[in-house]
Amino acid sequence: EDKVVQSPLSLVVHEGDTVTLNCSYEVTNFRSLLWYKQEKKAPTFLFMLTSSGIEKKSGRLSSILDKKELFSILNITATQTGDSAVYLCAGSLTGNNRKLIWGLGTSLAVNP
Amino acid sequence: ETGVTQSPTHLIKTRGQQVTLRCSSQSGHNTVSWYQQALGQGPQFIFQYYREEENGRGNFPPRFSGLQFPNYSSELNVNALELDDSALYLCASSQDRVSYNEQFFGPGTRLTVL
């Protein structure tokens, strides 16, 4: 059965810390790995990773995919209280199957 | 450019009832996906609609059904509600079937089944 596992499930840090969130996957017909940030309700898109070893970067956030070891990490440097959220990763499938396989998320709390 | 909107924001129903949730897609988007997110869980894919046709379905029973209208807005209908249907229901719109990186989520409808 396809699955995506995130760790840790929750994390509490202080402002300015750097955090690394992990996402491992076992997805048949894997196409890409997506990261989302969910604050109150709607998840907002962060990154889509399809190629191994190529880092995607957006400001203080960066992510990389390892297709051999079947995992991805999301790094956040110099964390701010506004980074507090649930970070979700999901695997997408090739072909005509449109569903995404989601992890449970990592709940990040950044304290001032 | 208007974003994805959903209605209602919150809803309380009792077991056995039926519910209809609505989603207006972002301007220019022709694909709508529906997800169920239980508390503390990741979203679960229910189904996707592309140009008024169902285009992919997750592991949900037939009492979960949907529609997409010519203006690409969409409805999710759930019949014979069960307690486990209590969740946040998210819809996401995108410009075509494969644009996962451009899938914009609405604020969600929080459904509580008593």
Image: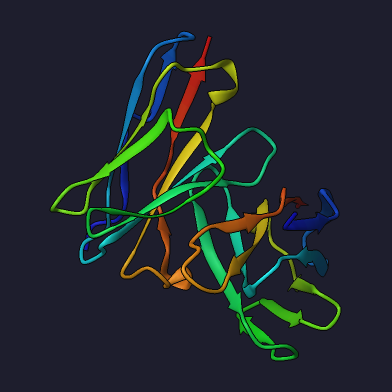
Q: Nearer the viewer, residue B9 or A67?
A: A67
Up-down: is B66 above or below B111? below
Q: A46 or B18: which is nearer to us?
A: B18
- Image quarter of the N terminus of chain B: bottom left
- The quadrant holding residue B93 is bottom left
Residue A92 at x, y = what percent? 59, 67
Q: Is residue A51 above or below residue B54?
A: below
Residue A101: give x, y in percent of width and height: 64, 57
* Residue in view at x 68 percent, y 41 percent: B41
Q: Residue furthest left?
A: B70
Rendered location of residue A96, percent (x, y): 46, 68
Q: Residue at x 65, y 33 (%)?
A: B39
* Image-quadrant location for residue B103: bottom left
* Residue A54, position as x, y percentages in the image: 69, 91
Q: Looking at the picture, tell me which residue is in the foreground, A20 or A90.
A: A90
At 71% from the left and 65% from the top, the residue drawn is A27
* Colour mapping: rainbow
Residue sitting at x 71%, y 53% = A103
Q: Is residue B52 left or right of residue B37?
A: left
**In the displayed structure, does residue B30 sit left or right of residue A68?**
left
